[in-house]
Amino acid sequence: MGDSGKGVSQPYVNYQNEIFARGILEGSLPQLTTDPNKLRLHAKKVLHKNAYNYIAGAAGEGATMDANRLAFRQWKIIPRMMRPTVPRDLKITLFGEQYDSPVLMAPVGAQQVYHEDKETGTAAACAELNIPFIMSTSSTSSILEVAKANGDHPRWS
Ligand SMILES: Cc1cc2nc3c(=O)[nH]c(=O)nc-3n(C[C@H](O)[C@H](O)[C@H](O)COP(=O)(O)O)c2cc1C
């Protein structure tokens, strides 16, 4: 997948091919599901009750969350047949920085509630995947800790 740290960007489809190849040739399934609903159930099993409720709870009766999901479901992937699809370029430029795809990590506060790596862990993963990490004002890591977690990533030097 995207790996700006090394200046090399792999197409996301390689990940799908890897899943298929491992499943068919080695009978080995991915550690995690690609189905968000099953992922939620898995999270419920492995997380502390308070941590799970913090993330999954939404606000009030969850009306906004329902509306957001419904809106997201209106987006469809349109297959484009009989056209060249390689090379595929999903790159975007944001605030003068180039990213491999238009995917951003939304700000999520108090990440220590559900993982000991807190924001530093998420930021490091984002840096590895060349995805912008948006830091919440309610973070449980400081800006400096997050910057350090990105190590020698050029964006922080
Ligand atoms: C557990 C949790 C914590 C969040 N914390 C913040 C926050 O600190 N600051 C913020 O601006 N948005 C926060 N959000 C909102 C998300 O960044 C995002 O905008 C929201 O989840 C809507 O996106 P969605 O419809 O894809 O879930 C939080 C969301 C969740 C689920």
Image: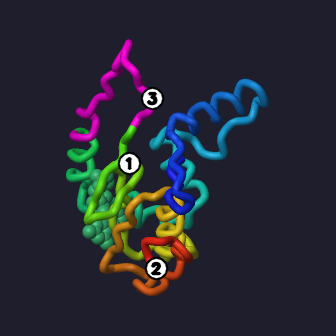
What colouring method underlies this structural image? rainbow
Q: Dot 3 corresponds to which residue?
A: 86
Percent position (x, y) of residue 86? 45, 29
* Type of the residue with mark 2: Ser
Percent position (x, y) of residue 14? 57, 36
Q: Dot 1 corresponds to which residue?
A: 101
Magenta segment, principal secondary structure? loop
Give the CA distance from mark 3 to mark 2: 33 Å
- The residue shown at (30%, 79%) is 137
Q: Which mark is residue 157?
A: 2
Q: Earlier in the sequence, mark 3 or mark 2?
A: 3
Residue 107's place in the image compared with 13, above or below, is below
Residue 50 visible, this angle: no
Under circle 2, the secondary element is loop
Density class for disc 1 (Cα within 10 Å; few <14, some 14-19, many ≥20) is some
Quadrant assignment, res 25:
top right
**Mark 3 near mark 2, Cβ–Cβ under 8 Å?**
no
